[in-house]
Image: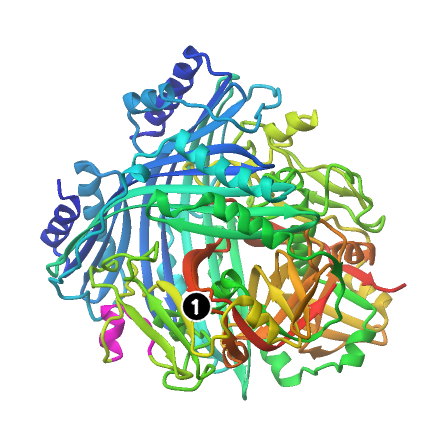
Amino acid sequence: MSIQERADIAEYAVAFADKLGFDYCDAFVEGVTGRSYAVEQGKLNGSSYYEKAGIRIRLVKGRRLLTFSTNKFEKAAIASIISGYRGFNGVDTVFSGEKAQRAKYKVGERKRLADADVLADLLSLDKTLAKRKYIKFRSVYAGVGKSDTFFVNSDGSRIESSLPSAQAFASIIVGGGKETRQRSMQFGGIGGYELLDPEKLEEKVLDEAKALLNVIENGMRLSQHELRDVRNVVIAPEISGIAVHESIGHPSEADRVFLREAAQAGTSYLTKDNLGLEIGSPVVTIMDDPTIPNSNGFYLYDDDGVKAGPRTLVRDGVQDELLMNRAYAHFLGKKSNASSRSDYYSNEPLVRMANTYLKPGNATLDELISEACDGVYIKSFMEWNIDDTRSFSRYQGSEAYVIKNHRLGKPVKNYQLETKTIDFWHAVRLVSNEFELFLGNCGKGEPMQGVPVAMGGASALLSFGR
Amino acid sequence: MDYAKSIVDRAMRSGCDEAVAQAFYYRTSYLKIANSKVDSIVTKDEAGGSLFVSRGKRVFSTNIDGLTDATIAAVVRNAKTSVAKLTPKDDYYGIADGPFKYGAPESIDKELSGYDNALLSDIAYAAINSALSTGADNVAGTLIISRSRGTTATSKRVHGLEDSVYARLSLRAFVKGFSAQNVTAAKRLKDLKPEALGKSTTELAGMAASHGQIKSGTYDVIYLQQPAGLLFSMVNEMACVGSVETGGFLAGKLGKDIANKKLTIYDDGASNRIISAGRFDAEGYPTRKTPLVSDGKLLTYLHNNSTATKYKTKSTGNAGLVLPEPNALVLEHKNSSGSLDRLVSCVDKGILVTNTWYTRFSNYLSGDFSTVPRDVAIYIEKGEPKFAIKQVDVGSATGIRISENIFRMLKNTVRSANDTIQTGSWDSDGYFVTPSVLVTGVRVTTA
């Protein structure tokens, strides 16, 4: 069935619901295709192909929201679902008034995914890694695919999109003597196979492997006393990224702030009573922007049919925008900032991040390190976690170095940055002019929905206990 | 029509050496509870399937979207061309050779299988009202009811039918700045007991009369059933031979002492009481209850037919479509103190942890990880609960973190209570049958 035929059924669903007097209806059609390969320790352990399509219909009547999804594109079945709507005693849901959108957009492929020999490239990467005896375990995975969508709602919006994606993961365990260290990496984004340049991937994974080996062979362990004395910490964009995602992006999601997500992905330190909180120092500005070309969290219109743009989550240290869908925008008396996303047609759209980053400043990385004088530089992490309210986080340095007399020194093996969110962001003294994004899959909701996101931005110097 | 068999027949006619097909239909509803009300209901209705084929040691898998003749024909054509382009998997040894005998299927509860929005709403409000009347300030949660039918067929004379319905209710209650979360699940409506869940979850959240702070250091930790299930089920996950071969913490540990001698860990895919159990795995091999850890030793890894053949052993009934997958954790401990209160009385300086989340490994091979207590945690001193831990004055946060090593945890699991239940967690798809357990010498850091 073509996207046009599916779109016709979506149009039919909205028109039918309109005729039955629903306050609001939208229909979202998605067709996805893709293939993936997993090569582990030299073996092709998995090869799969998928091709799926379905429709999601959301209905609001008497302020009650019901969502249905099916992969059966049959008008009679859809009419039966809509006619069979039965409300319930519960929460009021009203969508904010938004401009009806008519749009059609697609992302191009500079290197066509259909032509890519993904498996050959993975096997080649595996072979290269296998030659390095210090890489004890290796797993590489890549998947390429495409999502075609059509959205129509009873407000008059009609939006069509076509988004190709290319993703790769690599996980390595590097060993020397009795010690091992592990690293996981993710590459790609929304676009063609140019996002998974095999040579660049190989170079990146080998660099990471060498860096881990250097930590094992030349790294030092700081004593408890030395760890307590670390006051200045320079965090690289990978650490800034996980920190903005976990301790700023998530708590800025309106459905956490107002407890819709309380039994699933959790709550927030932000509440209706402390919006506008001074969360960090004046040099901290944190953005979330779905419109960055080829980024992992790219989209131009959200699943509520609202046009997307950059969102300022923290401006000059002060909490600014919450991430909102149309329901929370109405609740707050605002316009939506297009944060409604689902991972797939069959799941409900939730309030989500896209590409979250620490906005760059003017300093160079060298200036951050020099300004730190003595401390620790954390370049990458492996283990991290954060509490339910997003108040207390830990980032375990995977690759980290001592800063001594304004210069980088030996690698450090056991540095963990474990702080309260409010202390972390208030400690930021200087922000670099770098900008780098890292990929992630962000989980939320029940059933769990993993949506592609990116996170990163600049490096920063944090000075604690000043 | 027997779609699974038809798909296998087509795949074999196309020249494959082996084929496994699954065909299914399901209807699942998710009711969301927020701010002590029903927030929304999402219902999914889907028909589809999957196909796994091998040819000359090349293996390939794909989904089947909708069970139409045209879709199935296209999927088989694609499988035939795709598998030919792959490189052989030299350590692939084939699917299980049937036929197999399965036990009689369970009867389906008519009340659950005929569910509608009114029933969903009634169950949710039974739990919400019970929690509110017990003292909850706010209640959140999810109620899932799922009805599914599926058939599995293989080219090795396997044919099986699974017909199931279950309900799963997850509830989080907030009481005066503290929270607790519990999960209950049942295959029969009469066994779900939403009122009891509302009451017990609220009582847990409000169990401490006061709050206080602790210092970073080493504590004995009692994990209630849910966090015990989350943490110890990592053993089941890492016992899957795919994880072993790619650097999981059980690599090279077969037959070695890895745990306290009184701790027994099973992987159970067969017991009727377990919600996720079925009569056969993804290649139709009969599921079973497999002892993984006994008398301190790791007894086996978890296999499908191919990996079992490779390692010269028998399948444990853990086949996924491609690689082995874990079933439910069943944990037993020979040193049971009796009630939870008795277990608490054994602790001189410790913490009662009611829930964890964000368990993350710094190194899967060494087994080093950390995890965060998500809901109320109680400080215990000289055998008595003293206060709820509150290191940060934000919402229901406790502000503590546990840093562990999996082997240290397994070795230091010295006792349990006699409060075994089946539970689950938002943080996991699986189910766990476990009592509360006591782990000594746990490193805890504080905000």
Q: In this view, does B248 lie to the left or right of A354?
A: left
The boundaries of the magenta stretch are: B300-311
Examine the image and state in which quarter residue A228 appears.
Answer: bottom right
Queried whether the magenta region covers residue B280, the answer comes back as no
| Residue at 70 percent of width and 69 percent of height | B445
Going by the numbered disc 1, the residue's amino acid type is: Ser
| Residue B216 sits above or below residue A19 on the image | below
Quarter of the image for the C terminus of chain B: give it: bottom right
Q: Is residue B384 left or right of residue A76?
A: right
**Residue furthest out toward the bottom:** A177
Residue A456 appears in view: no
What subunit carries mark 1? A
| Residue at 47 percent of width and 53 percent of height | A167
Residue A64 x/y as whole percent: 51, 24
| Residue at 60 percent of width and 28 percent of height | A326
Which residue, given by chain and number where applicable, does mark 1 sit on? A139
| Residue B422 sits above or below residue B169 on the image | below
